[in-house]
Image (cartoon, rainbow, N blue to C red):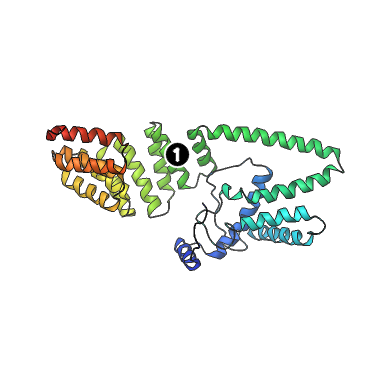
Amino acid sequence: GHLDAIINMAGIFAMHAKMGISSGTYLLTQSRVVLKYFGLLFFPYSQNLDHDLPWSAGLFDGVTLPSLLVVILLIAAAFRSARRFPLISFGILWFFLTLSVSSSIIPQKDAVMEHRLYLPSVGFFIAFLAAAYGLIKHSRWFVVCAAGVVLSLSFLTYQRNALWTDEVKFWEDVVRKSPGKARPYTNLGLVYRKHGEYSKAIAAYEKALSLRPPSGEPLSRIYTNLGAVYGVMRRYPAEIALYLKAIAADPKNYQAYSNLGYAYALVGDYRNAVKYGEAAVKMAPRFDEAWNNLGVTHARMEHYQEAVYAFQGALRINPYYKEAASNLSLAREKLGQS
């Protein structure tokens, strides 16, 4: 997203040191990323929402050095040819200048993200069209080749757009292209769960866990999502165990606290249900679902006054929360209120 304020640079570097990615490692990796971006712009066949590109271990790791040399030569050529080919030079420099926001020495969590190409691609196409125009003047065959390229790209665009309309096929395509990355499997699990394919959702989440996702919040989220699938399947002991793992991985995961409290209520362990439900609303007082879940716990305990208070809390946050409104009505009936 856009930066809304001036960010303390020392804070940025401290944050990324915590991520374990040095500025040098990030810069070396980005030299390879730049060539990948060029490949996507020339022939966008391998588009992927969540690329899996390993960090460069050093200057002589794989194609890191050749990639870095290509980047340096392109920038040098742009400056050297500025007078002779001003549009081409401008396009190349525009590309690298606008890309430097995400592809320089300030590490980002993800090495490759296609949306980072939106603004830099303007420079790429300026340079490409300027060069193409020069070739057209000297070769009719170039026009034929250009038409073939346009038709090919149009076909690829049609295929890609069709993929975006089917979220299951879309995320299956992502995991096919990034089979060694946990996050695509996590998102595929969410989609399978949404479509009621619970066995496939469980398999996707378990695959994500087997790929050793980052500890903390990402790991906790997978445990929470997997627990929710077991909850829908009414396999409560497994659900509870997973929420406990989620909380152990990230003690600030209020969704896991709320879900755990609700799961405990469903198995009749009201002491723990209240404990975790109250912890959830304390951690996230604006989380309407946590208030509703706590209200359900109190209603099952026949503590209807407390249930009414909790359901009202959910509706104060979200007046359109139909489930909370229905639960509030039932709780008031039990209290003899209108």
Quadrant where the C terminus sits is: top left
* Rendered view: 325 above or below 9: above
Residue 87 position in % (x across, y down): 76, 53
* Rendered view: 9 above or below 319: below
Residue 288 makes an appearance in the image: yes
Name the residue carrying label 1: 188
Number of marks: 1
Q: Residue furthest right?
A: 138
Q: Residue furthest bottom?
A: 10
Residue 153 position in % (x across, y down): 68, 37
Residue 328 position in % (x across, y down): 21, 36
Query: Residue at point 24% right, 32% down?
Result: 326
Residue 201 position in % (x across, y down): 39, 37
Q: Nearer the viewer, residue 169 or 212?
A: 169
Q: Nearer the viewer, residue 311 or 52?
A: 311
Q: Nearer the viewer, residue 299 or 172?
A: 299
Q: Quadrant of residue 65?
A: bottom right
Q: Residue furthest front?
A: 338
* Rendered view: 301 above or below 100: above
Query: Residue at point 63% right, 56% down?
Result: 98
- Amino acid under disc 1: Leu
* Rendered view: 47 above or below 75: above
Residue 240 makes an appearance in the image: no
Query: Residue at point 64% right, 42% down?
Result: 44
189 left or right, relative to 86: left
Neighbours of disc 1 within 10 Å: few (<14), some (14-19), many (20+): many
Q: Secondary structure at mark 1?
A: helix
